[in-house]
Amino acid sequence: MPHEVLVLYYSPGGTTAEMANVIARGVEEIDGVQARVRTVPNVSPTTEQVDSPIPADGPLYATTDDLIECDGLILGCPTHFGNMPAAMKHFIDSTSALWMGGKLAGKPAAVFSASTSIHGGQESTLLTMMLPLLHHGMLIVGLPYTETELFQSKTGGSPYGATRLTDDLDETFLSDDEHKLCLAIGKRVASTTKKLFQ
């Protein structure tokens, strides 16, 4: 039975969805590992779900069962004031029972993000997404500088995770460097998962 890595994202504009799809392809480049792609619904200012229970198109909404059933996690969302948006935080906050039971401890995890400005808080968003994962006992996987795109990218990329910079709100196409770094984070989590759970 193949190992599964959950690629969980929130993407109101489509950019992080594009990243998630490339990351999932990176996961599946590792033999014996498959990607499970899920998203989270929008929430209201009072943190109530405002979308229908089943998305009209695209991946299903994540449940805590997805986290339990998968061997690894790659979590992504756009930057919102240097932090993760409410929709993703709302989902993460629903995982207390998993934390109490240690259900995610020892599983590898990585993060990715996108913003519309180079100083929009990409790295702080990546770091704030890591904090609950560390509380869960997950093993954080980053992007080392052996990924040469980190040296040359003029748009996205960080040792903390894959990132995307877009100065056009309608632009969802990744640069070559961003594309390679998304593939790399997917492959790194998949290969780490495979090694941990052989």
Image (cartoon, rainbow, N blue to C red):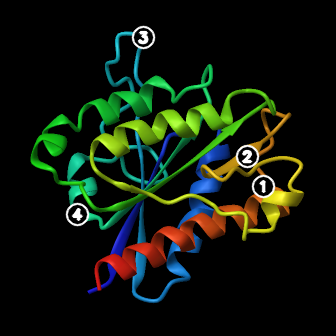
Q: Position of residue 43 (x, y in %)?
A: 40, 23
Give the amino acid at mark 1.
Answer: Leu
Circles 2 and 1: CB atoms closer than 8 Å: yes
Q: Position of residue 47 (x, y in %)?
A: 35, 17
Q: Quadrant of the N terminus?
A: bottom left
Q: Is residue 36 left or right of residue 160?
A: left
**Of callouts 3 and 4, which one flags the residue occurring earlier in the amino acid sequence?**
3
Q: Which residue is denoted by mark 4 in the rendering?
A: 69
Give the amino acid at mark 2.
Answer: Arg
Q: CA distance from mark 3 to mark 1?
A: 30 Å
Q: CA distance from mark 3 to mark 4?
A: 30 Å
Residue 164's label in the rendered image is 2
SS label for mark 1: loop
SS label for mark 3: loop
Q: Which residue is denoted by mark 3 in the rendering?
A: 45
Question: Badge 1: few (under 14), some or many (20 or more) residues near its Cα, within 10 Å?
Answer: many
Q: CA distance from mark 2 to mark 3?
A: 26 Å
**Of callouts 4 and 1, which one flags the residue occurring earlier in the amino acid sequence?**
4
Q: Quadrant of residue 33?
A: bottom left
Circles 3 and 1: CB atoms closer than 8 Å: no
